[in-house]
Image (spheres, rainbow, N blue to C red):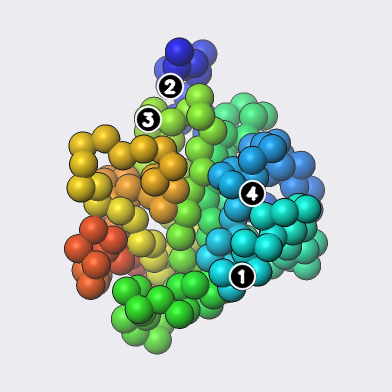
Amino acid sequence: MQKFPPDFDFLNKIHIQPLTKSNWLKFVQLFGVKGACGNCWCMYYRLKKADFVEGKFNDGNKDSMHQLVINDYPTGILAFYENEPIAWCALAPRQHFMKLEKSRVHKPIDDKKVWAIPCFFIAKNYRRLGVSVQLLKLIIEYARENDIHILEAYPTIPTTEKLPDSFAWIGLYKSFDRAGFTIVDQTSKNRPMVRYYLNEH
């Protein structure tokens, strides 16, 4: 049975923090024993396929993510309701995501500095409550405050009415649309490239 947050205005009470050494344990708490999904630990886009698969065992991917955090690389954003971590969104310069750099479908459309949002993870009890849209709106504000001028993502446009949660990790196009992102490339009919342009110089 769905557990609803105690406060139905909870979306406006969500706050975010970039993942750092100080909140690493909150990230671990959110991802749980499965490392979000199949011991991914948000390393799928960051590693070669063979290294990623190997990292699913013996905490390899978890340790790889921890090393990025220890070395102060930008990795993503944690969302909190009260003091509970409820969602995650990967966020880093596009070139940090190896699979994006080699993607045939999502090739760069220009040489501008872009920060990519390739995946989400939302705690089970907080899904289908509008968290992803609210998180994107907060990320837009974070970008504005941190001199990030272009946000880019590669969400899915489902071909069926109900998309299993396990396929929603790349984000749903409708969420990005509601947050103000626009399609900038549709080489893939069901996986468009979307962007949000902030103040550019």
Q: Position of residue 67 (x, y in %)?
A: 77, 63
Give the camera-side residue of 65 and 166: 166
Q: According to the image, label 3 marks what residue?
A: 128
Q: According to the image, label 1 marks what residue?
A: 50
Q: Amino acid at mark 4?
A: Asn
* Labels 3 and 2 touching (C-beta < 8 A): no
Q: Among all residues in the image, which is located at the extreme bottom? A: 111
Instruction: Say which label, 3 or 2, has the lower sequence index.
Output: 2
For residue 39, the mark is 4
Q: CA distance from mark 3 to mark 2?
A: 15 Å
Q: Amino acid at mark 2?
A: Asp
What residue appears at the point 27 percent right and 63 percent down from the top-left corner? 192
For residue 134, the mark is none
Q: Position of residue 20 (x, y in %)?
A: 73, 54
* Labels 3 and 1 touching (C-beta < 8 A): no
Q: CA distance from mark 2 to mark 4?
A: 33 Å
Give the camera-side residue of 117 and 134: 117
Q: Position of residue 185 (x, y in %)?
A: 24, 71
Q: Amino acid at mark 1?
A: Ala
Instruction: Say which label, 1 or 2, has the lower sequence index.
Output: 2
Q: Is residue 185 visible?
A: yes
